[in-house]
Amino acid sequence: MFSLVLPTYNEAENLPELLPKIREVLKDIPHEIIVVDDDSPDHTWEVALHLTQEMQDAHVIRRVGRRGLSSAIIEGFLAAKGDVLGVMDADGQHDIDLLPRIYSVVQGNTDLAIGSRYVEGGSIGTWDERRHALSRLATNLARWLCKVRVEDPMSGFFAIRRSTFEATMPTLNPKGFKLLLDILVHAPRTTRVQEIPLQFGVRTHGESKLSRRVQIEFIEYLYDVTFGKYIPLVFVKYCIVGFVGVFVHMGAYTLAAAALRHGNDLTIGNFSLSVGIAVETAVLFNFMLNNLWTFARDRLRGFAAVLGFLKFNVACIFGALANMAVSTFLFSRGFPEFMSVMVGACTGVVWNYTMSRLLTWRGKM
Ligand code: GDD
Ligand code: MN
């Protein structure tokens, strides 16, 4: 049996045109259709339920509080009963007439059939130059990672043998859009693949959900499966934030010192106060950026964020004191002003790192 998953997010206008066509094309093949909708604001799930009311082998999964193309497809595959599992865009961009061929290829002795835009006879249709270039770049980077070589590892139109999917499933990373790539990265080298030329069409209604966020997730994914094994991505992000934080510290110091300076004179007390203001600014900056980016998955919101910020201050307090002590000492001994601030900031960073390493994440950082 062929289980076809249709992931949807705001495709209420497209489904009524698409579903009957799919049924028609697959009428001689034992099949089921599984719509996986992420609680679309346009009520795609409701439209899907209505359309499939009379259909024996059609199901609708409505996921609430979750988003993501890859995880939606995985969830659809897990609910499927067929020995061949397929997926296609629910917006009319994928050529429905290829479905029987894709199915029969996997029915034969191939494990994975891909609707490919980059083999002879395939094409990407009418994309603007920017999307074109981005896709080419992503495809080239992706190809280089795959254990199993193909021309179009980023395609959203493919079918896979159930046993191949089950063998690969536990290692998959369900973030973002790149399920096929992830399968190609983790599937056994012996996986047999066939690419079928696909002319990528235009969306019937609505717009693409491949957002900037999805693109960033793709870059993070590339890191995860290459260097991420040696140095975890969160640690790299934490360091980048800390590095940028030093510049925030310097900037905030410059402003505070300018306000507290009388003529050219800066008293040691006012120097210390300026460093203190700069430290707190940097702590706030680091907290916000780490919360938004580094630890985006466990992001703190509302009152928990306020509490988290207070805890973060406690964690930083000795680094901050070390910073202020060192910079004030140097400045009072006649060291150049900005040099003192910079050396102080670096002391704070080294201190925090050492303490985290010794006490908090012993041996992990
Ligand atoms: N359930 C669910 N959740 N479905 C989603 C989500 C989501 O978060 N995001 C997108 N979809 C659905 C869309 O409704 C559509 O049916 C399908 O997944 C593909 O999304 P599109 O927004 O149409 O993507 P695209 O056409 O820009 O991108 C195509 O090309 C990419 C490579 O260039 C797709 O085929 C991608 O899979 C492919 O990687
Ligand atoms: Mn699409």
Image: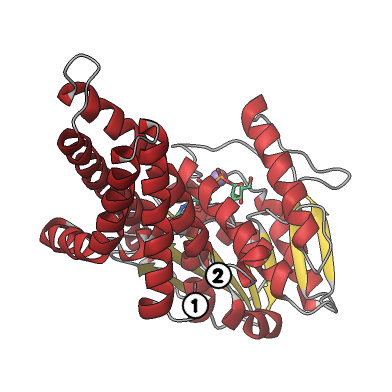
Residue 242 percent across, percent down from the top left:
42, 51
Q: Position of residue 119 (x, y in %)?
A: 85, 48
Query: Does any portion of residue 266 appear in the rendered image?
Result: yes
**Residue 97 located left or right of residue 283:** right
Give the mark, 1 or 2, whose residue is nearer the N terminus.
2
Mark 2 C-beta to ligand 1 under 8 Å: no
Neighbourhood count class around disc 2 (C-alpha, 10 Å): few under 14, some 14–19, many 20 upward: some
Q: Residue furthest front?
A: 333
356 shown above or below 88: below
Image quarter for residue 354? Answer: bottom left
Task: Please name the amino acid that badge 2 sits on.
Answer: Asn
Instruction: Name the spot of residue 139 as percent of width and height, x first.
Output: 73, 48
Horizontal side, residue 252 vs residue 106: left or right: left
Q: CA distance from mark 1 to mark 2?
A: 22 Å
Question: Which residue was labeled with disc 1?
Answer: 364
Among the 4 quarters of the image, the one containing residue 177: bottom right
Direction from residue 84 to residue 331 in the image, left or right? left
Tag count: 2
Q: Which mark is residue 173?
A: 2
Q: Residue at the location (22% across, 46% down)? A: 280
| Nearest to viewer (mark 1 / mark 2) | 1
Residue 37 spot, x, y in % from top left: 39, 61
Residues tagged 1 and 2 counted as in contact (Cβ below 8 A) = no
